[in-house]
Image (cartoon, helix red, strand yellow):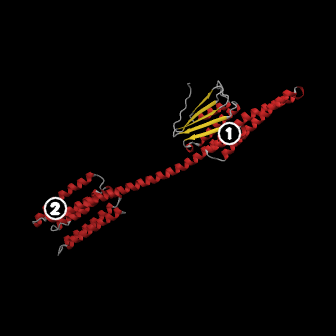
């Protein structure tokens, strides 16, 4: 739009100066009239050609033809120096559309050569040269060239800004779509994590509660057989059955509580506190829970596995170590989350990982973390685990 306006203004300048040339003579000749009309038509043709894609590519042709028409004004009107203004208008066009410096230098050299020839011709015809008018008009040419160059840079910068804005807009749309996809993916991951956790809990119910219920049935059959022959032993067996049933019921309640908490999402700290409170009510286990750092930055999958590690640790503490107190300490940094669960149970001289410890190890290793079990007889049991939040590593084979 702006280039079209400038190009139209250029054509108006050519026509007005051509008419000024014609009106500057008191009694113009027919030849001068014909030339002015021809020059006006030539300027119009060059203007239309420059407006086409072919003209923009071969702009040197119409500019050269404009040079020849301007020289024609010097030939037919040697008394006037308005031809330099026409050269100035042509200079604006050159600096606006020229794409390389070679074309600009070529036309500049050609201008000075043509200007020298025109001065020589004017001197031969009129016998005088107006140095003042030539200097003023040449200054006008320089000014128009500078203006043309500045407008060229301005339009180029505007095109670049529009291009960059378009790219920025496209990038923004791409980022927006990526954010939506990432949010959708995050929701899917969270849902899959919960499904996996439910499946794992159901497996644990099958393994632990199922084992206890099987043992309970066996012991009930033994008690039934001994009821008449050995009543005392039958009574002891019934007490054992009662303990097995109580333990099975406790684990069912804890598993159901975990599933219920997953259906009603809450903060990690709230979940762990509720878990410890439930254990205190059902087993009498006193506990202390401390957190250092921002727990909100933990991924949902790690939060779930941390909860299960704490749950299995205190379950083992009560079930196998007869612990009465437990301490849970967690430290969250930008790159790692560390947790330590320590109880005051009976402990053991040798740690032999069973189902619960193996399950904890699998959970931690799945996230590229590490877990350590420490225990000494009569000094309780310690579980230390760490989960990387940024750089994950897995070691296959070796010590």
Q: Are marks 1 and 2 in contact (CB under 8 Å)?
A: no
Q: Percent position (x, y) of residue 187?
A: 60, 47
The quarter of the rendered structure image containing the C terminus is: top right
The quarter holding residue 29 reads bottom left
Q: The residue tagged with tag 1: helix, strand or loop?
A: helix
Q: Is residue 269 left or right of residue 41?
A: right
Q: Residue at x 48, y 52 (%)?
A: 172
Q: Which residue is most to the bottom?
A: 26
Q: Nearer the viewer, residue 296 or 396?
A: 296
354, 17: nearer the viewer = 354
Task: Give how far apart the Cα atoms at labels 1 and 2 are.
Answer: 97 Å
Q: Which residue is mark 2?
A: 118
Spot occupied by residue 182 in the image (x, y as percentages of width and height): 55, 47
Q: Label for residue 294?
A: none
Residue extending furthest toward the left: 127
Horizontal side of 199 relative to 55 (left or right) equals right
167 relative to 71, above or below: above
Residue 353: percent from left, percent from top: 65, 28
Which image quarter: residue 151? bottom left
Dot 1 corresponds to which residue?
Answer: 199
How many numbered dots are placed on residues in this image? 2
């Amino acid at each position: 739009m702006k280039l079209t306006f400038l190009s139209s203004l250029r054509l108006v300048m050519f026509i007005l100066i051509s008419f000024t040339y014609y009106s500057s003579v008191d009694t113009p000749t027919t030849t001068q009239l014909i030339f002015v009309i021809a020059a006006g038509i030539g300027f119009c043709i060059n203007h239309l050609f420059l407006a086409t894609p072919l003209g923009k590519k071969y702009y040197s042709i119409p500019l050269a033809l404009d040079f020849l028409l301007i020289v024609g004004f010097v030939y037919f009107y040697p008394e006037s120096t308005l031809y330099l203004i026409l050269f100035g208008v042509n200079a604006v066009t050159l600096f606006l559309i020229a794409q390389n410096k070679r074309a600009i230098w070529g036309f500049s050299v050609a201008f000075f050569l043509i200007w020298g020839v025109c001065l020589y011709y004017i001197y031969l015809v009129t016998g005088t040269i107006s140095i003042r008018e030539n200097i003023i008009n040449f200054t006008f040419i320089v000014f128009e060239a500078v203006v043309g160059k500045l407008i060229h840079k301005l339009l180029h910068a505007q095109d670049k800004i529009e291009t960059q804005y378009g790219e920025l807009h496209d990038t923004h749309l791409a980022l927006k779509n990526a954010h939506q996809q990432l949010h959708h993916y995050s929701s899917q991951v969270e849902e899959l994590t919960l499904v996996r956790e439910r499946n794992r809990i159901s497996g644990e119910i099958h393994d632990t509660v199922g084992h206890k219920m099987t043992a309970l049935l066996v012991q009930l059959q033994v008690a039934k057989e001994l009821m008449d022959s050995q009543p005392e032993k039958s009574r002891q067996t019934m007490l054992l059955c009662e303990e097995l049933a109580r333990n099975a019921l406790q684990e069912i309640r804890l598993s159901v509580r975990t599933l219920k908490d997953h259906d009603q999402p809450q903060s990690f700290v709230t979940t762990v506190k509720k878990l410890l409170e439930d254990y205190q009510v059902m087993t009498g286990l006193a506990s202390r829970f401390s957190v250092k750092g921002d727990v909100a930055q933990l991924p949902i999958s790690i939060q779930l596995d941390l909860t299960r590690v704490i749950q299995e640790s205190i379950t083992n503490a009560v079930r196998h170590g007869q612990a009465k107190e437990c301490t849970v300490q967690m430290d969250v940094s930008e790159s790692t989350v560390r947790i330590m669960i320590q109880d005051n149970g009976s402990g053991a001289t040798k740690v032999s990982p069973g189902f619960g410890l193996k399950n904890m190890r699998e959970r931690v290793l799945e996230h590229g973390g590490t877990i350590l079990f420490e225990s000494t007889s009569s000094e309780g049991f310690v579980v230390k685990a760490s989960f990387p939040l940024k750089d994950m590593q897995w070691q296959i084979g070796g010590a």
